[in-house]
Structure formats: C-alpha cells, structure tokens
Image (cartoon, rainbow, N blue to C red):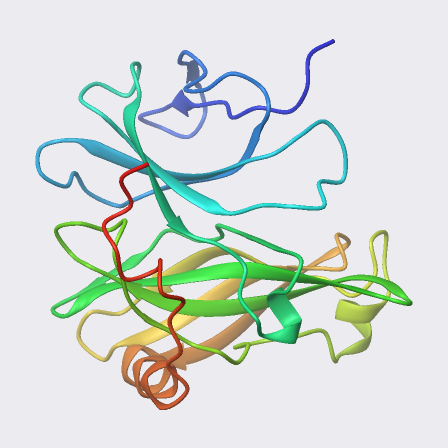
Amino acid sequence: MFGPTIGIAKTTDFKTFTRLENPFLPYNRNAVLFPRKINGNFVMLSRPCDNGHTAFGEIFLSESPDMEFWGRHRHVMGKSGSWWESLKIGGGSAPIETSEGWLMFYHGVVHTCNGYVYSIGAAILDLAEPSKVLHRCSNYILTPEEWYEERGFVPNVCFPCATLTDSDTGRIAIYYGCADSYVGVAFTTVQEVWDYVLKYDKLNDEDAELGIR
C-alpha cells in the first residue's frame, strides 16, 4: 500500500505544468523549497511521517543539484517543550532571506482533550547551513482564535502556506489555512517577527548543531 509523499511540478506560465520525479519515497509531507540555491544546490524542507494522522514529526532538509535526485538529508529541528508544539512540527511557507539568516514560519501541533490544535511558529536558520537553527521562538506567532480558524472541516487550525515580503519596507503577508476550510492572511514585518523571536528565544540543544544524521 502506498502512502502520502511529495510531488513536484514546473511551469513557465501557470497554465500548463510538467510533473517531475517525486523527490522521496512514501511517507513524507510538508515540502518547502527555499527561494534560491544554497551552496549550488536546491534545498527542500520536509517531514517524514507514516500513513495516517501522524502522531510524530520533525523537520528535515535535503539537497539536490537538479531537482530530480535528492540527498544530503539533515535534521533541522523537532518538537519542543512548549505546549503548542509538544506533539509534532512541520514546514509551512518558503523561508524569507534576511541579512542575518532565513526567517522560517512553520506549524506546531498539540493534542488536547478537544483534538489537535495547529499553530504557527517562527525560527531563524543559518544562511549558509540552514540545518543549523540560530534562534527559535518559544511562543507561537498565530494560534486559532477567530471563528474561521476554530470551526471548519478540520477545526482549530492555523497552517502557514505562503508569504510575500516587500524587501524595501520589510512588510510580510502570511497566507495561512484556517480550519482546512478558509484561507486567511495576516500582516507583520520582518523586524517585528525578528524582535519577537529573539525576545522569546529558546533553542533545544540539538537545534544549534549542524544537522548531520
């Protein structure tokens, strides 16, 4: 039996698409491509899983010279002791490049008596070695509070999907899934998020290591 895995397609006009080879075997989810090559290679975040509503999950990084063959798999970071990401974590939107590191929005999950709750967190990765976490916010950036985040096909979900960044002003628009039924958008700035991450910075010991496994 097959299970979930990651697919890749390319386009030049967003009307027609050419499917590429799947980068990984099942089971894998939450693929996130970095917006440029790093050290000459394409770089992708992913979260190995099992076939079902996985009760575990950590973020890994892989590299490819050609978007077809992927290797150099590295661990980036796992769940933390913070309540909102105490069950599992996974990628979200493409990391934002800053002069001091990659600003990464990701999702964290907690299992409550009312089911799973998905929140959005933030971390800063090393520019040249993004498997190394420089800073990690112990608090969530966004958690389900509005009715459209709490009620829907899958309740209590804020899931980061994409970001747009204005390089001149640093303004960020975060597009995120709400309860698997709606799409929301939240606005902030690179500086605001950066300051918040540093204020509540709390790394796991393994986060700061190069992710060689």
Q: Name the quadrant of the C terminus.
A: top left
> In the image, what residue occupies the spot 17% across and 22% down?
65
Q: Which residue of the protein is positioned furthest toward the right in this rendering?
A: 114
Nearer the observer, 158 or 113: 113
Residue 8 in percent (x, y) is at 43, 23
Residue lying at 36% horizontally and 65% vertically, measured from the top left: 205
Residue 198 is situated, as x and y percent measured from the top left of the image, at: 32, 84
**144 or 108, which lies in front?**
108
Percent across and percent down for residue 95 are: 33, 56
Q: Position of residue 133 (x, y in %)?
A: 29, 61
State the image quarter where residue 149 is shown. bottom right
Q: Residue furthest front?
A: 205
Q: In the rendered image of this protein, does residue 40 appear above or below residue 36?
A: above
- Report whether 126 appears left or right of 113: left
| Left or right: 59, with 54 as reference point | left
Task: Tally the numbered discs.
Answer: 0
The N terminus, quarter of image = top right
Residue drawn where x is 31% and y is 80% of the image: 194
Residue 176 quadrant: bottom right
Q: Is residue 75 left or right of residue 116?
A: left
Residue drawn at (68%, 19%) of the image: 3
Q: Quadrant of residue 163?
A: bottom left
